[in-house]
Amino acid sequence: MRAVVQRVSRASVTFGGAVVGAIGPGLVVLLGVGHSDTFDTAAGMAEKIVRLRIFADEQGKMNRSLLDSGGALLAVSQFTLYGDVRRGLRPGFDQAALPEKAAAVYEEFVTCVRSHGVITETGIFRAEMSVNIVNEGPVTILLDSEKQF
């Protein structure tokens, strides 16, 4: 599983001209599901993300988590995080999970984040959406469940 995590002051996702998910301060997570990912992978990634210490404390140091800050999370499925361009200019997506599996693992991730009491909004799985992100810091963290980076 791969995630791009961005600390935001606000974010929204639009489909067909209508906002389908929006948050104020918190995190946007662009989430890609790979072939080997399971519900356990989703739970581990959710746990790591809600506990990432990337919010400022009273001294201005990144020392607080999403749970500490009381922020929300916007999860957007993004299979293109598995795009492989090592052999050309058009990405190959062989390592991305098939849509049926990816949808179930993505939904498990969302369920796990919500189980921590975090207000969680989502996009629409497999839809072409517009994502509006106001990144604060900017702070952007890349995560890979197989620790490839």
Image: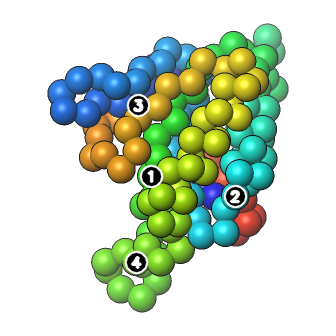
Foreground tag (1 vs 3): 1
* Residue at 40 percent of width and 45 percent of height: 125
- The residue positioned 65% from the left and 33% from the top of the image is 111
Q: Residue 64: x percent and y percent?
A: 78, 23
Q: Earlier in the sequence, mark 1 or mark 3?
A: 1
Q: Label 2: which residue? A: 38
- Report the mark closest to the observer, 2 or 3: 2
Percent across and percent down for residue 43 are 75, 44
**Dot 1: element:** loop
Query: Sequence order check: which comes first, mark 4 or mark 2?
Result: 2
Q: Residue 15 lies in what quarter of the image?
A: top left
Distance in Å between CA atoms under marks 4 and 2: 22 Å
Residue type highlighted by circle 3: Ile
Res 91 visible: yes
Q: Report helix, strand or loop for mark 4.
A: loop
* Residue that mark 4 sits on: 92
Closer to the chain start, of discs 3 and 4, is 4
Sequence-wise, the earlier of marks 4 and 1 is: 1
Does residue 40 lie above or below 67 as drawn?
below
Structural crowding at the residue carrying mark 4, measured as other residues with C-alpha within 10 Å and reported as few (<14), some (14–19) or many (≥20): some
Does any portion of residue 52 appear in the rendered image? no
What amino acid type is highlighted by mark number 2? Thr
Q: Give the side of residue 148 with respect to residue 5, left or right.
A: right
- Quarter of the image where one finds residue 5: top right
Depicted 3 relative to depicted 94: above or below: above
Taking the spot 60% from the left edge, 51% from the top edge, the residue there is: 105
Q: Write down the residue under mark 3.
A: 133
Horizontal relation, residue 135 to residue 89: left or right: right
Could you give the CA–CA distance between mark 3 and mark 4, rounded to whole angstroms?
26 Å
Instruction: Give the amino acid type for the residue marked by disc 4 in the picture.
Output: Gly
Tag shown at residue 78: 1
